[in-house]
Structures are given as C-alpha cells and as structure tokens.
Amino acid sequence: MANKPEEPSFPWANTWPEITNHRVRDAIAKVSREEFVDKDLRDCAGQDAPLPIGEGQTISQPFVVALMTQACDPQPGERVLEIGTGSGYQTAILCELTAQPGAETGDTVFSVERHASLARSVVPRLRRMGYTPHVITGDGAAGWDEMAPFDVVIVTAAARCLPAALWRQLADDGRLVIPIGKRNSGQTLWLFEKVAGRMRRTMLGPVRFVPLVSPLLEKAENCIEFDT
C-alpha cells in the first residue's frame, strides 16, 4: 500500500477541514506570510487573522485566502486576474498555483491595486521571492480589459454588486470569486461560474473585507445586481 502523502506543515494545517484541495494547501505551506507584513508584526504572521498593511488595507485571514483560492481553483498556465494586490500574499499563492515548466512563475497572473504605494512596494517583494506577476495601479472595478479574457478572477475587497466589467472579462468556463456587501453590514463570499455564457453562482459564506472603492460602481450600468 502506498504511503499517505505528508500533510503540509504550517500553523493552520489541522484546523482547516474545509480546505480539501492539496494544491492549495501546499501553496499556503510554501509561501511565508511573514514576508508580507511589517517587521513589527512578523510575530503575528502565524495567526489565522487579518493584519494591517497600510493605506487602511489588510492582509487577509489565511483561511479566507485558502477558501477563495480553493473556490476558483487556478490551474497551471491559466490566466488569473486579481483585484486588490495589497501585500502580495494572495498574489504569490496564485503565482505558485499557475506555475508551469519553462515559464516564469507568475507570468499569467495579472493584479490591479488601487493604492500606488502598495503597488510600488509589492513588485520588488514578489521578485525577491521569485515571482513575476503583472501589477498595475488602477480601478479594480474596471478590471484589466487589454489582458482579458481571464480563466480566473479573484477580488480581495467587498463590492456592493458584481462589477459588470469583471464578469465581461471572465472567459467561458471561468470562475470568479468576490465578496459582496457593505462594510458595516453583512458581506457574503460568492463564486460565479460562466457556463456557455450563462451565470451560475454559489454562496460560500459570510466574510468581512475592506470595501472595493470605485466611482464606477456608483452607476447602475456598471453593476450586475442579483437576488441574494
């Protein structure tokens, strides 16, 4: 009988029965969260909790990162759009999961960050770690139209609706994960799948994220509303 594969060794390994995807667990184990927080918070990096990273933003709770990543299930070579680069922690995990032989790790990962200071700091950090995603400063609700379509879209801030541009930029058979709701009321994590051009949605549970700030979402034509 073959030996059972070893469980990845990381602080939360035995407390996440919901995370059954071993590729995701391996990526979480490989990417050191300490590299993505300020030096004075590194003692807290092993906590399964969000931490501040500046500009009123946070590095997400590791369990939520794992849950969102498992839901969108990035595969080697797939094109991934991340909205909200933040510290770059989620970006690095996406780079690991989309890596393929003969290509730079992160070459198919595209990330949009609203805060220029965060975008400037994250690129050299990721490159030191061997990751080469494409990062720009911009309005996340607009996505990255020139680089579409994307097999996966993952949004790390809560929007009041599903941004129409992100749905439009999702490839057929693509997966989009996004928290929807207001900052001071209930937010819900959703998985949207595009199947033959039609929408299939799955509720993944309650979450709490910083808001996705965008003037685009103030206009009804830029939002896709649906009954929750």
Image (cartoon, rainbow, N blue to C red):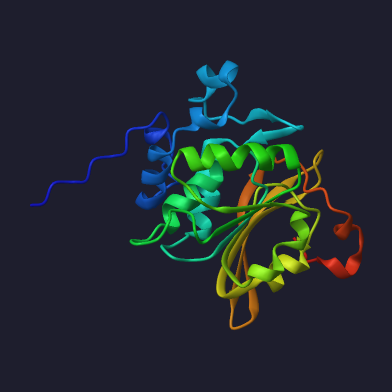
Give left or right: position of 40 versus 127.
Answer: right
Give left or right: position of 154 versus 228.
Answer: left
Q: Which residue lies furthest to the left in this view?
A: 1
Q: Is 48 or 126 nearer to us in this picture? A: 126
Q: Is 80 or 8 nearer to us in this picture? A: 80
To which quarter of the image does residue 226 belong?
bottom right
Q: Which residue lies furthest to the right in this view?
A: 219
Give left or right: position of 221 versus 228.
Answer: right
Residue that appears at 57% across and 35% down = 61
Q: Residue furthest bottom?
A: 196
Position of the C terminus, as image quadrant, is: bottom right
Give left or right: position of 185 versus 21.
Answer: right
Residue that appears at 41% across and 57% down = 99
What percent of the width, then of the height, locates residue 67?
A: 52, 48
Q: Is residue 116 above or below residue 81?
A: above
Q: Is 224 or 58 nearer to us in this picture? A: 58
What percent of the width, then of the height, locates residue 85?
A: 64, 46
Residue that appears at 44% across and 65% down = 77
What percent of the width, then of the height, locates residue 143?
A: 72, 62
What percent of the width, then of the height, locates residue 53?
A: 66, 30
Q: Is 211 or 228 nearer to us in this picture? A: 211
Q: Is residue 204 above or below residue 202?
A: above
